[in-house]
Amino acid sequence: MSSETISEPDPTGLVIYVGQDRAGHWLVQDSRRNLEGRFISYGAAMSYAQAERDIYHASVEIANAPLIPVISFAPVGRDERALRRAA
């Protein structure tokens, strides 16, 4: 097994997008919609995306259209139970 680090992303692999949703929240999402994060600033979102890029050998792109959140940021409804804490 080689211990060399792969510095270039796989061109057919995962893409991590940084952008905003229609409400102006900064989001990071991957092209497979398995990864999502919400951030207070562009810088925070980009830092996270770059760290994830290194882990998954992905490429990072700025979204050219508003991102659609996978997880709703709407308040919990009266008929729903909120978890005490996230996973």
Image (tube, rainbow, N blue to C red):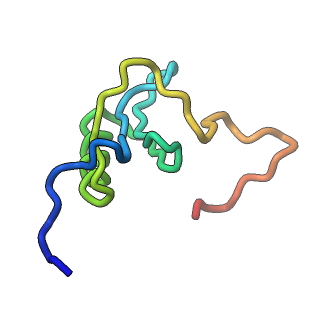
Residue visible at 34% across and 43% down in the picture: 12
In the foreground, 33 or 46: 33
Horizontally, residue 54 falls left or right of residue 2, namely right
In the foreground, 23 or 1: 1
Snapshot quadrant of residue 78: top right
Give the percent coordinates (x, y) of residue 65: 43, 18
Give the percent coordinates (x, y) of residue 32: 50, 44
Residue visible at 27% across and 49% down in the picture: 10
Taking 8 as reference, is 39 above or below it?
above
In the foreground, 68 or 55: 55
Counting labels gives: 0
Horizontally, residue 1 falls left or right of residue 25, namely left
Snapshot quadrant of residue 1: bottom left
Residue visible at 14% across and 76% down in the picture: 3
Taking 69 as reference, is 56 above or below it?
below
Horizontally, residue 33 falls left or right of residue 12, namely right
Residue visible at 43% across and 43% down in the picture: 30
Give the percent coordinates (x, y) of residue 46: 27, 40
- Check the image and name the residue furthest to the bottom: 1
Give the percent coordinates (x, y) of residue 41: 32, 34
Screen quadrant of the C terminus: bottom right
In the foreground, 29 or 71: 29
